[in-house]
Every structure is written in C-alpha cells, then in structure tokens.
Image (cartoon, rainbow, N blue to C red):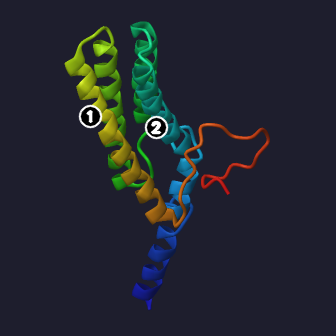
C-alpha cells in the first residue's frame, strides 16, 4: 500500500505546474511570438525582394540593401530559437542559416561578382524548400497550417494559424 501511494504521488508530481505543455499548444504559442510565423514570412519576403531587385537590375546599392535585410532578418530569427520542438528548431535553424548565407553572398556579389550571385540564387532556392519543411512540421504538430503573415490587423486577436 505504501509503494502504491508513493507511486501515485510521483505521477501527480510529474504532471504538476512544471510539466511541459502539450506539444501542439507549446508550438502554437511559440508561433505567435517574434520567432514564429512572422519571422518565417519575413525571411520568405526578403528572399523574394532580392529576386525582384536582381530581376529589375536595380543599382548595386539597392541590391545590397535587400541582401543585408535578408541576412539581418535571418540572424534575428536564429536568435529567436529554440522552438518547443527539437526537430522544428533544427528545420528553422537550417533554413535561417541558408538565408543568412544567401544574403551575405548576394551582398558581396552585388557589385558584379556573378559567381556569388549564382551561389546566392541557389541558396535562396534551397531556402524555399527548407522553410516549407519547417511549415510542414508545424502543421504536423498542431494540425493546422500556420500563418506566416508579416502584418497583423490592429487589435486583432493573436491566432498563429491566421483564422
């Protein structure tokens, strides 16, 4: 009887206030923060802005600006890791590391180094698939596709899934 009582107390203690949140709830909560969906969306938008600046043959100073934004936003996003899920953290870290490299290569190639610009283009293409893997992981954990919007309506309730 004493053993049963001690076992029950141990189980109750494990489910107390210090116990980890349900994974779906923890990831959903993390996605509403600065490192979540909006960071993913910002890095995606930065990559597209680099493509646009290069496609328009913008001056090297303008290209450098969007490339620097890509690097800066990727490094900021890395700083917001870890997530509540180790696999998601790894997926996002991989994506944001590639984004940072793409921005640096673009920045350094903006004055006419075609090999750096090609490498940046390859990295930005890889970034798209890496971010998709991370978004798929969020959906697998939570059962919902996350919002990656970089803007929120004023006074709107926080919903990581954009519902």
Relative image position of residue 149 (x, y in whole percent): 59, 42
Looking at the image, the residue that sits furthest to the left is 115
Quadrant assignment for the N terminus:
bottom left
Check disc 1 and report its element: helix, strand or loop: helix
Describe residue 68's horizontal placement relative to residue 34 as left or right: left
Near mark 2 (Cα within 10 A), the count class, few <14, some 14-19 or many ≥20, is many
For residue 73, the mark is none
Q: Which of marks 1 and 2 is nearer the N terminus?
A: 2
Relative image position of residue 124 (x, y in whole percent): 34, 34
Relative image position of residue 7 (x, y in whole percent): 42, 81
**Closest to the observer, 90 or 106:** 106
The reply to whether discs 1 and 2 touch (Cβ–Cβ < 8 Å) is no
Check disc 2 and report its element: helix, strand or loop: helix
Residue at 46 percent of width and 26 percent of height? 52
Describe residue 163's horizontal placement relative to residue 118 as left or right: right
**Closest to the observer, 162 or 92:** 162
Residue at 48 percent of width and 61 percent of height? 139
Relative image position of residue 66 (x, y in whole percent): 45, 20
**Closest to the observer, 125 or 5:** 125
Describe residue 128's horizontal placement relative to residue 21 as left or right: left
Is residue 149 positioned above or below 78 on the image?
Answer: below
Q: Tell me if I can see residue 76 in this picture.
A: no
User: Mark 1 — residue?
Assistant: 122
Instruction: Give the alpha-carbon distance from disc 1 to disc 2, as whole Å.
Output: 14 Å
Near mark 1 (Cα within 10 A), the count class, few <14, some 14-19 or many ≥20, is few
Looking at the image, the residue that sits furthest to the right is 155
| Quadrant of residue 102 within the rendered picture | top left
For residue 44, the mark is 2
Residue at 30 percent of width and 30 percent of height? 121
Is residue 7 positioned above or below 158 on the image?
Answer: below
Looking at the image, the residue that sits furthest to the bottom is 1
Describe residue 111's horizontal placement relative to residue 1 as left or right: left
């Amino acid at each position: 009887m004493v053993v049963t009582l001690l076992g029950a107390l141990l189980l109750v203690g494990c489910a107390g206030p210090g116990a980890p949140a349900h994974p779906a709830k923890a990831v959903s909560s993390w996605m509403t923060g600065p490192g979540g969906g909006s960071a993913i969306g910002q890095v995606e938008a930065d990559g597209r802005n680099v493509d646009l600046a290069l496609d328009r043959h913008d001056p090297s100073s303008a290209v450098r600006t969007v490339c620097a934004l890509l690097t800066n936003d990727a490094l900021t996003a890395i700083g917001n890791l870890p997530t509540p899920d180790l696999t998601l953290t790894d997926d996002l870290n991989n994506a944001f590391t590639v984004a940072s490299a793409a921005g640096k290569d673009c920045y350094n190639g903006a004055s006419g180094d075609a090999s750096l610009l090609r490498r940046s283009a390859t990295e930005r293409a890889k970034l798209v698939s890496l971010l998709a893997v991370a978004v798929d992981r969020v959906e697998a954990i939570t059962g919902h596709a996350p919002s990656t919007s970089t803007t929120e309506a004023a006074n709107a309730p926080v919903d990581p899934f954009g519902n």
